[in-house]
Amino acid sequence: MAERFPMGTGISRGFEKHYGIKISRFSQGLAQDPTTRRIWFGIATAHDFEIHDDITEERLYQNIFASHFGQLAIIFLWTSGNLFHVAWQGNFESWIQDPLHIRPIAHAIWDPHFGQPAVEAFTRGGATGPVNIAYSGLYQWWYTIGLRSNEDLYIGALFLLLLSAISLVGGWFHLQPKWKPSLSWFKNAESRLNHHLSGLFGVSSLAWTGHLVHVAIPGSRGEYVRWSNFLDIPPHPQGLGPLLTGQWNLYAQNPDSSSHLFSTSQGAGTAILTLLGGFHPQTQSLWLTDIAHHHLAIALIFLIAGHMYRTNFGIGHSIKDLLEAHIPPGGRLGRGHKGLYDTINNSVHFQLGLALASLGVITSLVAQHMYSLPAYAFIAQDFTTQAALYTHHQYIAGFIMTGAFAHGAIFFIRDYNPAQNEDNVLARMLDHKEAIISHLSWASLFLGFHTLGLYVHNDVMLAFGTPEKQILIEPIFAQWIQSAHGKTSYGFDVLLSSTSGPAFNAGRNIWLPGWLNAVNENRNSLFLTIGPEISWFIMLLL
């Protein structure tokens, strides 16, 4: 078909001649193709670096590293667009006046196909024309972290746009011959892990703690802190005194009261780092001072963890030695993790598979924790947003996990070396793959057929007017988990729901009262009461 439409080829040739750019230059075979296939195949394989002409292991790592900067640029540009469109077409300044009753606007709808009925149906949230309502939680997030005006949103958009440009320049910069990192630099796993643990997670968590303490917490108490008055408003009345004198407990004294109105000074305290537990009575979200304390603790842990692996300084552990020591006791389960260090360090597909698997699990946990431990003001009372965010993150987790399995499979096909991994965990997994796959298969088939059978039976009973004959399965395991976390309505009397147990007594005077009050009331999305009906509904949704 491509040969029938030579116009596209002419356009692409003209583009190449005018701009001096060779389309598909990474593949001489494609670059010399006379048809438009050269364009489409080029787009399809542009990032399949392993099949490019003259590719080497070092060049592969360099291209992947540079493409990370392009990925960051896209992310920053995308998030900048979110801020810009809400500032331009949204109603952020109106929404913060009444977050529970004004519907947040994502952006306007400019569609010439809209007739008057459609215009009227989509004109809402106080807008003058058709708009989309925001169910992303962005309004709640921005409000929580201290943004209060459209000007703040525009400044944030410009800042992210600048970061996007810097990322693009960074990607180009690291592709220049003088600044291309060497293969040994990429293979130095200990240094890379130290850098990511300490520099990425540690420093970024510490910086976020600083923002919460200096901007978000004062904002929740009615103080508007920006660069113009940043040095004039101390986050705590005693400033750095408690830090320098070792009296850190002073930062936790005088927290916000239960009558505190968010974004006002009414009922506000002066504490900046607390462990109150539970949730703000008005916003039904975690206390900001608890969140700041959490991020400070995370920062401290990761700053220390960033010194865990041995580098040029000779301190810390060798990852290879740690892995080699992981041998199952008794010797009946093979050689454990022997050979894994070199196997992982020499396979980008294994590394990507592990990273995607970790990120997939984390994303799924985020989906669950966003509604059970809501961190953003008033988001717990917006059930549509909560459901949308849960579904969104579980979908993302599924896609990411699929990528993990795909690249894990590519590793086994392309990079796996049997001699290097003799009788270790990878070899034993391959040796038992038939048993593993067949058991997973029959378990999935069993669950699928019986779930479908249950649905069909219950639907038939409803259709014949005998709903009492439905088979309703009580979700006792989920109820037990909620009871263990303090929900008392199920009568399990276990862990935090047992007033005489050690778990209850351990937290009685610290964080427990606020937590128990929050999980046992139904004004939020924390621990929704679950039974056969709601579990059935959730299963249908999933």
Image: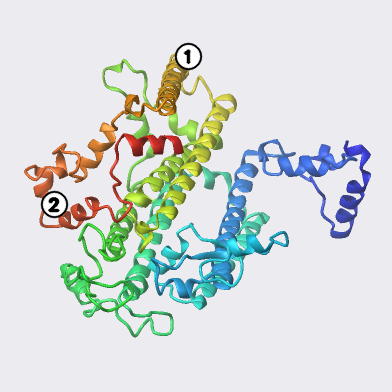
Quadrant where the N terminus sits is top right
Left or right of 49 on screen, residue 69: left
Amino acid type at circle 1 is Glu
Q: Considering only vertical position in the picture, is 70 above or below 446?
A: below
Q: Considering only vertical position in the picture, is 479 above or below 236?
A: above
Task: Describe the element under mark 1 as helix, strand or loop.
Answer: helix
Q: Position of residue 228 (x, y in %)?
A: 43, 84
Q: Which mark is residue 10?
A: none
Q: Which mark is residue 434?
A: 1
N-terminal of the pair, mark 2 or mark 1, is 1
Foreground disc of the pair 2, 1: 2
Left or right of 369 on screen, residue 153: right
Q: Considering only vertical position in the picture, is 267 above or below 334?
A: below
- The residue nearer to you, when weighing 118 against 33, is 118
- The residue nearer to you, when weighing 114 against 62, is 114
Amino acid type at circle 2 is Gly
Q: How is the image coloured?
A: rainbow
In this rendering, the count of numbered labels is 2
Quadrant where the C terminus sits is top left
Residue plotted at (39% across, 84% down) = 229
Q: Position of residue 12 (x, y in %)?
A: 87, 51
Name the quadrant containing residue 227.
Answer: bottom left
Q: Position of residue 456 (x, y in %)?
A: 45, 24
Q: Residues within 10 Å of mark 1 (few under 14, many from 20)?
A: few
Residue plotted at (49% across, 75% down) = 152
Q: Which mark is residue 507?
A: 2
- The residue nearer to you, when weighing 440 against 97, is 97
Left or right of 254 on screen, residue 116: right
- The residue nearer to you, when weighing 217 against 143, is 143
Q: Position of residue 300 (x, y in %)?
A: 30, 58
